[in-house]
Image (cartoon, helix red, strand yellow):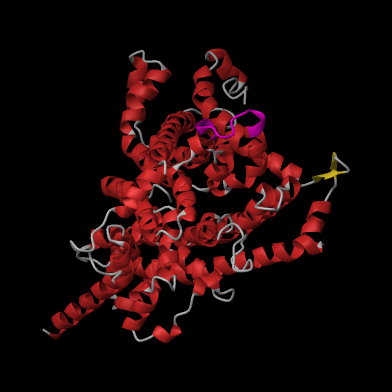
Amino acid sequence: MSKARHSTLRSGLVHLALIAYTLVALFPVFLTLVNSFKSKQAIFSQPLRLPTPSTFSLIGYETVMKQGDFVTYFQNSTIVTVVSIFLVLLFGAMAAFALAEYRFRGNTLMGLYLAIGIMIPIRLGTVALLQGMVATGLVNTLTALVLVYTAQGLPLAIFILSEFMRTVSDDLKNAGRIDGLSEYAIFFRLVLPLVRPAMATVAVFTMIPIWNDLWFPLILAPGESTKTVTLGAQLFIGQFVINWNAVLSALSLAIFPVLILYVIFSRQLIRGITSGAVK
Amino acid sequence: MTDLASEQGTEAARRRPRRWHILVFLAPAVIIYTAVMILPLIETLRQSFFNVVGGEHVFVGFANFATLFGDPRWAADFWNALRNNFVFFLIHMAVQNPIGIALAALLSLPGLRFAAFYRTAFFLPTLLSFVIVGFIWKLILSPIWGVAPWLMDLVGMKALFAPWLGKPGSALVAVSLVSVWQFIGIPMMLIYAALLNIPEEVIEAAEIDGITGWGQFFKIKLPLVLPAIGIISILTFVGNFNAFDLVYTMQGALAGPDKATDILGTFLYRTFFGFQLQLGDQPMGATIATIMFLIILTGVCIYLFGVQRRIRRYQF
């Protein structure tokens, strides 16, 4: 009896602590979204209230739509992210397959070489990278960003995928070989479908830093036609810093895609982390 | 690279045709990775030994480093950025990782309801971009809006409110704590995964011996998740000494007030890319990047050869 009450009390305290931190984690996001739908007066006089019919206003969103070229920015971010993820997955899976499947001289060394990039950030080579992009005329192109993000994503992708490919049964692959499948067919038709869950995990891990990056768009592609959402929002907000409606609306617009993606992928992401994909 | 596919001992080579497919599988990844990541990194390190003297590009040995450490125009900024970066890192280690571990410990309690909801909520800030995080907190902490003073009033501490981001004494701590808020999901998730992986028998054995609750956490679980704590420490280290974005969005490229929030990333950006009246200086930028590389390399080596080896022995 007393033990039961004790455990109720304990679980109550646990939930209290967790709810407290949930508030800390979600409050800033909530505050931004709520206030982006209010008139300027209401933003200041009652920042914590939900918008009511009298305080509701879309003026901020109108400003953003009129002033900022957010459609282009979204398009750029989407192109860069999607193409980079595709290349990371394709080339990463191919390299991972080579490392996991075949025994050849220099296999371990090659694995270590490709693993350097997991720990050493690509940003440290920015000085020469910018010179190289200038020399090849790739500055202010989305290609520059795609190349950088592909190189950045490959090391972790190869590491995770080769772990998974080692678990694919040898019997299956050998059966394919006996049936006369080429090594390419074995990779694309037998192995790739089996490691699809791992590919999804890699895709999510690759996507977040690419979508959110500010450093490379700022340095390699700051031109109007190649701006990504992150850079565009940064500059827009800097410009409109006094217009709180516009700032809050721009922030909300930048949050929505992340929220939607997170709702879609959160189970995949969390399963990926907890199943040890990044250990 | 080219001889990868070839001989695996002469006998194997005679029996089998050259295995070109290995080369085909490896080539795209290796070429992009080498051309876009490794070569620029090496080239950047190389350029730190060169500078422009009298209009010509010449080898200057360690002169750039001497300038960075000792020249009055550079040294003050450099040591300031380095010191700030260490403070930034220490705040993460002291606040982010313990809270992350505590949250993971609570989440992994058996039979906890709504665990998935809490997990999702705690991880959300990690997914937001620096621009969003930086500006949201800038607005919240702004004395103009008054949300922060209002919140502090709720707990009776309104008198303690100050425009933290604008004061040289508190700006770095404020920015570090915002970064902690953003990234707490990573240690939380990794420790949570490690806690879930502890075998049931170990916990049962502890319970039979009468070790439960706090004692069980500190004596049994914590030692078993030490490898994961090692990983989050090195991830924090690498991330912090490579950080740039949050300071840039919250405090601008000048990392104000009065460079109180300047870290190596923002210092590197201003130096090599130039900012406002300051022209870009590529040799000095390369030198700063080299220093950052050496710092990160040292951290990674300490982890790989010092921490990880020792921890492995305690694993099953």
- Give the vertical position of A68 relative to B101 (above or below): above
Residue A231 visible somewhere in the drawing = yes
- Give the vertical position of B61 relative to B151 (above or below): above
Left or right: A156, with B265 as reference point? left
Which residue occupies the foreground of this view, B1 or A88?
A: A88
Picture quarter with the N terminus of chain B: top right
Which residue occupies the foreground of this view, A247 or A185?
A: A247
* Mark count: 0
Q: Residue at x 59, y 55 (%)?
A: B300
Extreme left residue here?
A: A1
Q: Residue A138 colored magenta?
A: yes
- Give the vertical position of A221 relative to B115 (above or below): above
Q: Residue at x 51, y 67 (%)?
A: B176
Residue A176's x, y, as percent? 34, 19
Residues shaded magenta: A134-144
Residue B144's x, y, as percent? 42, 71
Q: Residue at x 47, y 29 (%)?
A: A91
Q: Quadrant of residue A15?
A: bottom left
Residue A166 visible somewhere in the drawing = no
Residue A274's x, y, as percent? 34, 53
Left or right: A54, with B183 as reference point? left
Residue A232's x, y, as percent? 46, 46
Q: Residue B143 colored magenta?
A: no
Picture quarter with the C terminus of chain B: bottom left
Q: Quadrant of residue A229?
A: top left
